[in-house]
Image (tube, rainbow, N blue to C red):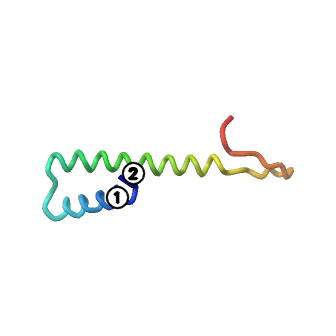
Amino acid sequence: MSIDDTIKRINELAHKAKTEGLTEEELKEREQLRNIYRQSVIGNLKAQLDNTSIKEKDGTIRPLKKN
């Protein structure tokens, strides 16, 4: 399942939760999908930070990535 499909399903479950409520199985599915989405966001942020550099006052550039 792609991240777009995950987001779409989360939104479907959110709408259903507001209108008619969710079954126990749907609540579990929603939690799993939310965890997948959170891990995706965290992974993307880490990748972005790993490719970020800091320019020091003396003009040198160093990677932000931990050594």
Label at residue 37 = 2
Residue lying at 59% horizontally and 52% vertically, measured from the top left: 48
Count neighbours of disc 2 (C-alpha within 10 A) and say few if under 14, some if 14 to 19, many if 20 or more.
some
Residue lying at 76% horizontally and 46% vertically, measured from the top left: 62
Instruction: Say left or right for 24 vs 64.
Output: left
Q: Position of residue 53 (x, y in %)?
A: 71, 50
Q: CA distance from mark 2 to mark 1?
A: 10 Å
Amino acid at the residue labelled 2 = Tyr
The disc, 2 or 1, on the residue closer to the chain's N-terminal end is 1
Label 2 sits on a secondary structure element that is: helix
Label at residue 5 = 1
Q: Position of residue 7 (x, y in %)?
A: 35, 59
Label 1 sits on a secondary structure element that is: helix
Count neighbours of disc 1 (C-alpha within 10 A) and say few if under 14, some if 14 to 19, many if 20 or more.
few
Q: Position of residue 58 (x, y in %)?
A: 86, 50
Q: In front of the other: label 2 or label 1?
A: 1
Instruction: Say left or right for 44 vs 3.
Output: right
Residue lying at 34% horizontally and 50% vertically, measured from the top left: 34
Amino acid at the residue labelled 1 = Asp
Instruction: Say left or right for 61 vs 67.
Output: right
Looking at this view, name the residue that lies furthest to the top: 67
Quadrant showing the C terminus: top right
Label at residue 47 = none
Count of number-bearing discs? 2
